[in-house]
Image (cartoon, grey):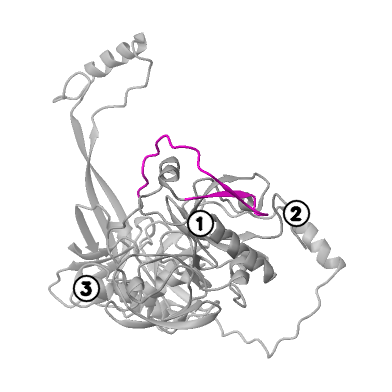
Amino acid sequence: MKRPASRTLRAALLACSALAVAPLAAVPLAGPAIARPAPDSFADLAAKLLPAVVNVSSTTEVKTAAGPDMPMFPPGSPFEQFFKDFMNRHRPPGGGGEDQPAPEERRMQSLGSGFIIDPSGLVVTNNHVIEGADEITVTLQDGTSLKATVVGRDTAGDLALLKVKSDKPLPSLQFGDSSAMRIGDWVLAIGNPFGLGGSVTAGIVSARGRDIHEGPYDDFIQTDAPINRGNSGGPLFNMDGQVIGINTAIYSPSGGSIGIGFAIPANMAKIDVDQLRQYGHPRRGWLGVRIQEVTPDIAESLSLHQPGGAMVAGVNPGGPADKAHLRNGDVILKFNGQDVKDMRSLPRIVADSEVGKQVPIEVWRDGKEVTLQATLAEMPDDKTQLAAATPGQPAVPQTTDLSGLGMKLAPITADTKSKYGLGDNQKGVVITDVSPDGAAAKQGLKPGDVIVEVQQSEVNTPADVQQHVESVRKENRRSVLMLIQRQDGMQWIPVPLGGGDEPQKG
C-alpha cells in the first residue's frame, strides 16, 4: 500500500502561523461534549477473551528448481557456457539433466489468527491466511495444537471457516452489532502478530465504511489499535467482549503497524459465516445489472435533485433485473428498503439480501420514481464477457455531422460493423469521427463507440440522435445523456451542450 502524503515541518509551521494570524471563529455546540472515561485496565476483559482466540498456521509444499538460478547471458556467450559448466559440477545428486536440475520440494508456512465461534470447534479466520494450504494447524492458548479442515471459504469476502476436533468443548466468542460502533469507541484486538501469539492491543474506532479497493464488498472498520502481520483473521472486540470486526488488512509502507488497520464488520461477517457453515460457500444475492456512478451532470440531465443512487448501464438477459423490467438508464434509489447512497453501496446491499426473496426496488425513470419487484437469484461464479468481431476491410461509411458536439455519426450497416468490429446484433448509431477540441472528445468518446440511447430513448439513425439533442437544447439543459456501447460494456456519458465545432443558434 502507498504511504499517505504527510505535511512537512515547514508546512506545519506555516499552518500554525496562519492560525495565529487569523484564528477560526468558535462554533457553538448543540450541547456539552462528554467523553466516557477510559478503562482503568483491559486485563479482566482480555483474560476472559484470550482462551477463544487461536493461532492459525498453514503449510504449503512448493516445488522449486534445485540450486541457484543461472545468470542471464546472450545466447552463445562464453559466460553462458562457463556458468552452465559450473552449475553442472555443483548440482545436487539426482539432477534432471544438464539444463534441467531436479526440482526441490520446499515447505512454505503462513501464520495468522482466528477465533472460535462454537464449542464444537468452528474457527473463523481470513481466507488469505489459509489460501493454497496443504495443511492447517490451529493452536490454542494453552499450547494445544489441532489439525483443521476447511468447512468453507469466501475468496471475495476474504473469510474462511475451519473445523477442529477436540475431546472437550472449547471456549467460544459471540458476534456483536458492528453497526452500533461509533467513531471514537474503544476496541480491543487480540491476535498472533509476527507469530508471537496471544497479543492484546487497544485503540478506538477511527472511521467506518472504508473502501480500500480489496474487493467489491469493502466496508471496513478502521482502527488505530496496533495490528501487524499475523493479526489477520483475529477478532476486534467492543468493551462487552463481543466480536465487532475481523482484522484483515493494514495500511503500512513498512509492514508494521502505523495505527491504520482495517477490520471486516461483524454484521457482514456473520451472514457470510452462517452461509459457509450451511453451504460451504457464500450465497450472495444477485440482481444482474451493470451500474455506474451518477455524476452531477447525469443527475441534471435526468432532473434528479442531487447526485445519488446507482445508474443501470446494462441488464443481463434473463436475470432477475431483466425479469423485473429494469432497463438501461434507470437510477436505483432504494433497494429492499435501504437507501442506495452511491454506486459503491449497491453491490453490498444486494449481496447481503436473501437469495430467492422478492424485494422492492425504487428507481428514477422518466422524471419520476417507479417501484419494481425483483426476485433475487444466487450470484453465479462465472461472468460472461462481450466478444467483438474481427474487423475487415470495409468501405467508407456515409457520415452525418452532429451539430455542436464535435462528432460524426453513421448508421450501423454491414460496412460499419466490419470497420469497427461491431457484433451482428449491434443496434444504435456508430461514432465515426471525433473532433479533438469538441465536447465529445472531452468526455472520452472515440470512433467506434456506439450510441445506443439518448436521454433513455433508443436511437437507430443519426437523425434520431440529432432530434433528441435538439429537444434537450430547447429545455435549456447543460448536457445530453447518451448510453455508449464499447467492447468492454456500456456506460452512460453526459455530453455537454455548451460548445462544439459550430456556433450555437440563439
Element under disc 2: loop
User: In this view of the protein, which residue sits in the foreground, 165 or 301?
Assistant: 301
Q: Position of residue 274 (x, y in %)?
A: 26, 76
How crowded pointer 2 is (Cα within 10 Å; few <14, some 14-19, many 20+) is rated as: few
Q: Is residue 72 above or below residue 275?
A: above
Residue 215 to residue 300: above or below = above
Magenta-colored span: 387-411
Q: Amino acid at mark 2?
A: Pro
Q: Eyeballing the image, is 444 above or below 464?
A: above
Of the image marks 3 and 2, the number of the one nearer the N terminus = 3
Drawn side of residue 479 relative to residue 47, left or right: right
What residue does disc 3 label?
277
The span from disc 3 to disc 1 (Cα, nearest Å) is: 55 Å
Q: Which mark is residue 37?
A: none
Q: Which residue is mark 2?
A: 503
In the image: residue 77, left or right of residue 143: right
Element carrying mark 1:
loop
Rendered image quadrant of residue 83 = top left
Question: Where is residue 57 drawn, in percent x and y?
Answer: 26, 57
Alpha carbon of mark 2 to alpha carbon of mark 1: how far?
24 Å
Say what amino acid the circle numbered 3 marks: Arg
Looking at this view, name the residue that lies furthest to the top: 78
Magenta-span inclusion, residue 408: yes
Query: How far across and how far down the image is residue 285, in percent?
Result: 32, 73
Q: Residue at x 51, y 68 (%)?
A: 456
Residue at the spot 43% in from the left edge and 68% down from the top edge: 263
Q: Quadrant of residue 427?
A: bottom left
Residue 266 visible in the current orientation: no
Quadrant placement of the C terminus: bottom right
Name the residue beneath numbered marker 1. 461
